[in-house]
Image (cartoon, grey):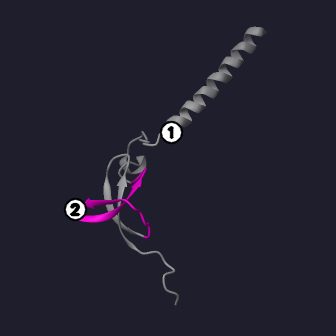
Amino acid sequence: MKKNTHPKYQKILFVDSATGHRFVCGSTLQPKEKEVFEGTEYPAYRVPVSSASHPFFTGSKQFVDSEGRVDKFKKRYMSKAQKNADEQKANDDEQ
């Protein structure tokens, strides 16, 4: 069998960037950042959403998005909807 073909499997500290929730899980990720958790130093990987912040698991109806993707979508959609409403009003005024 060939040597060094698989990435190293290790325990990684996952940090939810939305809530700060931290948990350790085995993974082949190779993050450069390190953090101490419960007295042990682990490689740390930041995730935008975990079970601590996802609406399905928390039971909340509001989605907390630390990266602002939801807000960007709503802003883009609202500006297009407003533009269409203005055009429709202008067309109605001409008739």
Magenta segment includes 66? no
Query: Does residue 39 sit above or below 89 in this rendering?
Result: below
State the residue lying farthest toward the bottom: 1
Q: Residue furthest left?
A: 39
Element class at badge 1: helix
Of the numbered discs 2 and 1, the one sitting upstream in the chain is 2
Residue 38 drawn at (x, y percent): 22, 62
Q: Which residue matches tag 1?
A: 70
Would residue 90 appear left or right of 27 to someone viewing this image? right
Residue identified by numbered label 2: 38
Height in image: 11 above or below 72? below
Query: Which residue is depicted at the point 72% across and 13% down?
Result: 90
- Indicate the amino acid at tag 1: Val
Q: Nearer the viewer, mark 2 or mark 1?
A: 2
Question: What span is colored magenta in the figure?
Answer: 28-50
Residue 47 position in % (x across, y down): 42, 54
What is the number of the mark on residue 52? Answer: none
